[in-house]
Image (spheres, rainbow, N blue to C red):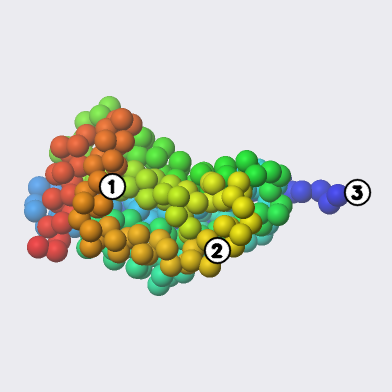
Amino acid sequence: MAPRVSRLRSPVSPIFLVLVALAVAGGALTLVPASGAIIGGTVLLVLAGWAVSLCLHEFSHALTADRCGDHSVRALGYLTLDIRRYANIGLTLVLPLLFLLIGGIPLPGGAVWIQRASLRSRAAISAVSAAGPLANLALAAVIGIGVVLTTPPLPLAAALSFLGLIQVLTFVLNLLPIPGLDGWGVIDPYLPRTTRASAARIAPYAPFVVILALFLFRPAGELLAEASASLYSLVGGDRDLVVQGNIQFARLLG
């Protein structure tokens, strides 16, 4: 008889709640009528908000995997929204935050280890890969529609809108069909074994090559930004507010 699987329990990590509180504090700071407070609040809201979205992205991967047959994610703590479970502090948290701060490009962040052999089908494997980016797109829609419906003061609306665009950038970047990114994970189950083996060898490096190319080859970066802005508009985002939020965020460096 197969062992009985315990019911899903997902206590929310206190660290996740701290990240949410930091994002809220950043939003509150943007309401202070002082340039330094608006800039600092925007940066805090965007960086803490990105860390929150990283947790939600990886949690979505793990929850989908659990529902599709891989229950090892429970023992590994992936269902707790604890960022320590998803991130190598240097490579997958500090470095992406630094790139975000200096360039506005969200590097792929943490990762959850999925036992693909435990998943029920190739479609399940694809669903697990797609779940993370879709969580970012859903969050972008919530932010965009929320800003429209609540009409907060301009500095806060702009900061939130810039965070929303970053969620769409994360969605678009992660769904590129490149080894190491979620987009490759979606199509990988349907590819020949030799192709998958070759891709696995370059998967640790390919995403960083893509990010470097976006920095060095301006048309590629502009195309990504335009595609993301257009998609953000479709899910409720406001381009003008995004531009203002980007200005507030960038003032920290100049």
Per the image, the residue denoted by label 3 is 1
Residue name at image x 60 percent, y 46 percent: 190
Depth check, front residue: 37 or 127:
127
Sooner in the amino-acid sequence: mark 3 or mark 2: 3
The amino acid sitting under disc 3 is Met
- Rendering coords of residue 78 (x, y %): 57, 56
Residue name at image x 51 percent, y 44 percent: 130
Q: Quadrant of the C terminus?
A: bottom left
Which quadrant holds residue 165?
top left
Sooner in the amino-acid sequence: mark 1 or mark 3: 3
Q: Residues within 10 Å of mark 1 (few under 14, many from 20)?
A: some
Left or right of 3, for residue 243:
left
Per the image, the residue denoted by label 2 is 198
Between circles 1 and 3, the one closer to the viewer is: 1
The amino acid sitting under disc 1 is Leu
Residue 146 in view (yes/no): no
Residue name at image x 29 percent, y 61 percent: 213
Q: How far is the residue under mark 1 from the one under mark 2?
A: 26 Å
Between circles 1 and 2, the one closer to the viewer is: 2
- Rendering coords of residue 253 (x, y %): 14, 64
Per the image, the residue denoted by label 1 is 224
Depth check, front residue: 1 or 128:
128
Residue name at image x 23 percent, y 58 percent: 217
Q: Are marks 3 and 2 in contact (CB under 8 Å)?
A: no
Q: Secondary structure at mark 2?
A: helix
Q: How far is the residue under mark 3 from the one under mark 2?
A: 39 Å
